[in-house]
Image (spheres, grey):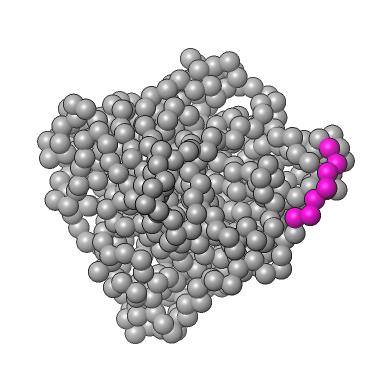
Amino acid sequence: MREHADDRAGRPMGVTRRRALNIGGSLALLAATGLAASAALSRHPPATGAELRSAVPLPPAFRVPLPLPPVLAPVATSGGVDRYEITQRAADVEILPGVRTPMWTYDGVFPGPTIESRRGRPVAVTHRNELPVPTAVHLHGGRTPAESDGYPTDLVLPEGWPDAARPAPGGHGHGAHTMHDPRAVETRLTRDYTFPLDQRPALLWYHDHRMDFTGPAVWRGLAGLHIVRDDAEEALGLPSGPRELPLMIADRAFTEDGGLDYPALDPTLRGRPGVREPYLGGVLGDVILVNGAPWPVHEVDAARYRLRILNASNARHYDLEAVVDGGRRLDLVQVGADQGLLAAPVTHRSLPIAPAERYDVVVDFSEVPVGGLVRVVDRTGSGRTRDVLAFRVARRAADDSPVPDVLADDLPTWRRSEAVRVRELSFRAGRMRGGHGWLIDGLPFDPARSDVTVGLGDVEVWRLVADVHHPVHLHLVGFRVLSRGGGPPLPHDAGLKDTVSLRPAESAEIITRFDGYRGRYLFHCHNAEHEDMGMMANLEVT
């Protein structure tokens, strides 16, 4: 990592030669030179990951109704705090029609139950771990004190599991079970997480964050939504109630008996971490799930709908468009990003979304004939992975929901001149302990090492450089995208984000203020397989 405390002008990085990775079946190096090659690769990105093929018969698209995750009721609301309880447990869940799939779940459902909360009203969640392995829960997008942020070694141990100081049976490789973290805070069976939620209204999500095993744990079902609301947002009159739909998109693959297929080196997730070599770039499935259903369909009124979209896939990127019978595309009017409302709407014909990104989009079905089908498709998909979900317009209906020209006036306006330093950070493949790894500035993750230290309240500019697709996520803070490849941000970079999708051979600049809380946090690639194989670093706020 290079730091420039006196570089306030934000000049593009002086990179004259880069190497990019094309990850298909294995890690293979491509030569790429200069910014022209970077731009070409960005226009025609290679596939980052390899696809598993399901062995079970799959249902036709647009036959299964879209499920909506249940909203969790608090067990108590005293003292100005809403208190919840969630049990992490194994359950057989019907994903494919008529087939029971063993999963790891929050409260026996996939996705996990949704928590709805109010801005500034704290939430306390007690998680009970009845799974056979340790867990850690991260509220992605939350402005959370460090002790509740779900650091990867702050584990909730199941009954009978040895302390992290003692290796688990058969343990070896890069993992919490062999790498000692003197600052780890473990609990047995349960842990209380406290979320102040003193932040903008937004779609957040919670998921497992155990060191070295995030990918397979999320793949098995440990993910759920958390929506923060406030009075100002509700006063805008955006589509609400049954016309506000949370959509968690995730790809999976299935074995012949209906189980989830995943290429783990140790399917018990108790010992050796990692995946088989063809999948080192990321694990892709051939079934697209939305809210846990394969290629679902949802009946809608001929009216505006607010779609709260999360890409919860391990590694798959999507480029979404809404297509009416006959090929006409509907506008996707973006009103929010990862960290809440935009200043003003941005209209897209298609919308790229990387793992962990969220987009808040209004779609108007009023001009679609009753009975018409609107297909949401992935322009980068092929075959069955091109389809995502569909909407069937069922009836004419009144609709007085506006999309205001001004959505929010509380977005931060950090300026380059405020930055106390500029950091340069590279996200690239490399060697790690004799095998393939994914590294930040040439180093794999080590919980005992301090990588980046910032002062509470400091404004910094970070220049991020990638070899292949890397969705880079910062814990604790949101940021603004300043530039890509030395040029302006893209239209979908608008607003306050916590995850930026770096395309192959691309650089991007982000700016943020590190405020909120002191303590140890993380930044990492949110391709879950990259993260598990070392592409994570410590962020100390002092």
Q: Quadrant of residue 263?
A: top left
Q: Residue at x 15, y 46 (%)?
A: 180
x then y, percent, for residue 51: 51, 34
Q: Tell me if I can see residue 131 in this picture.
A: yes
Q: Is residue 277 or residue 59 the one in the foreground?
A: 59
Tag count: 0
Q: Could you tell whether 153 is left or right of 97 in the image? A: left
Please provide percent x and percent y for residue 238: 68, 56
Q: Position of residue 491 (x, y in %)?
A: 63, 64
Which residue occupies 31% across, 51% down? 148
**Residues in magenta, as a range:** 395-401
At a point 75% along the width and 39% down the height, the residue shown is 300
Which image quadrant: the C terminus?
Answer: bottom left
Say if 72 sits above or below 234 in the image: above
Q: Is residue 282 visible?
A: no
The rendered magenta stretch, by its main secondary structure, is classed as: loop
Locate residue 336, reporting x and y percent.
60, 59
Side of 297 relative to 427 (left or right): right
Does residue 479 lie above or below 526 as drawn?
below
Q: Residue 218 or 77: which is nearer the viewer?
A: 77
